[in-house]
Amino acid sequence: MAMPLTPLPFELPPVFLARLGYRFDRRIVAVYWEPAGDEAAFTDGIHGLVGADHYVYWELTRQPAVQKWPQDHQVNLGNSNRCATHWLLIDRATGRAYVCDITSARDYVRTQILESWAG
């Protein structure tokens, strides 16, 4: 069973997913740092890409407020030196973004359902 989601307290950059390279139409998309290739990645449960535009990912994750928030909330999005324990989840229908543990993120992406936890 998937665990609760934590809403991001900041906005995603404009057309974040499109700029990462996401070109599909699924509602729930996970964005994460892939340690094996040391690259940004995304998946919607059917389509995925390791090697997404890391500059776009960094544009979000390297903002001072964004860097501080994960540290304050024990959220680990990963980086070149550390494997992630959390993924970003983006609900394309609402424009909202969340974080949750990787196992739960995979469940949300697979089922394409957030309503029970996202409210």
Image (spheres, rainbow, N blue to C red):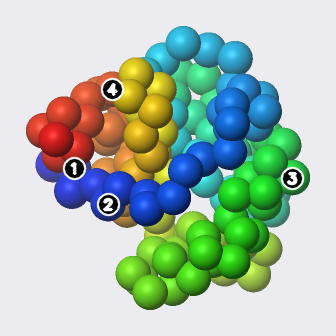
Q: Earlier in the sequence, mark 1 or mark 4?
A: 1
Locate the C terminus and report the quarter of the image it occupies: top left
Disc 2 designates what residue? 6
Q: Secondary structure at mark 3?
A: helix
Distance in Å between CA atoms under marks 1 and 4: 12 Å
Q: Earlier in the sequence, mark 2 or mark 3?
A: 2
Disc 4 designates what residue? 112
Distance in Å between CA atoms under marks 4 and 2: 17 Å
**Residue at horizontal 63%, vertical 39%?**
42
The answer to the question of whether label 1 and label 4 lie on touching residues, with beta carbons closer than 8 A, is: no
Amino acid type at circle 4 is: Gln
Disc 3 designates what residue? 55
**Residue at horizontal 48%, vertical 70%?**
85
Residue positioned most to the top: 25
Vertical side of 22 occupied by 77: above or below? below
Distance in Å between CA atoms under marks 3 and 1: 30 Å
**Front: mark 4 or 3:** 3
Disc 1 designates what residue? 2
Residue 21: x and y, percent?
A: 77, 29
48 or 117, nearer to the observer: 117
Distance in Å between CA atoms under marks 4 and 3: 27 Å
**Is residue 108 in view?**
yes
Snapshot quadrant of residue 51: top right
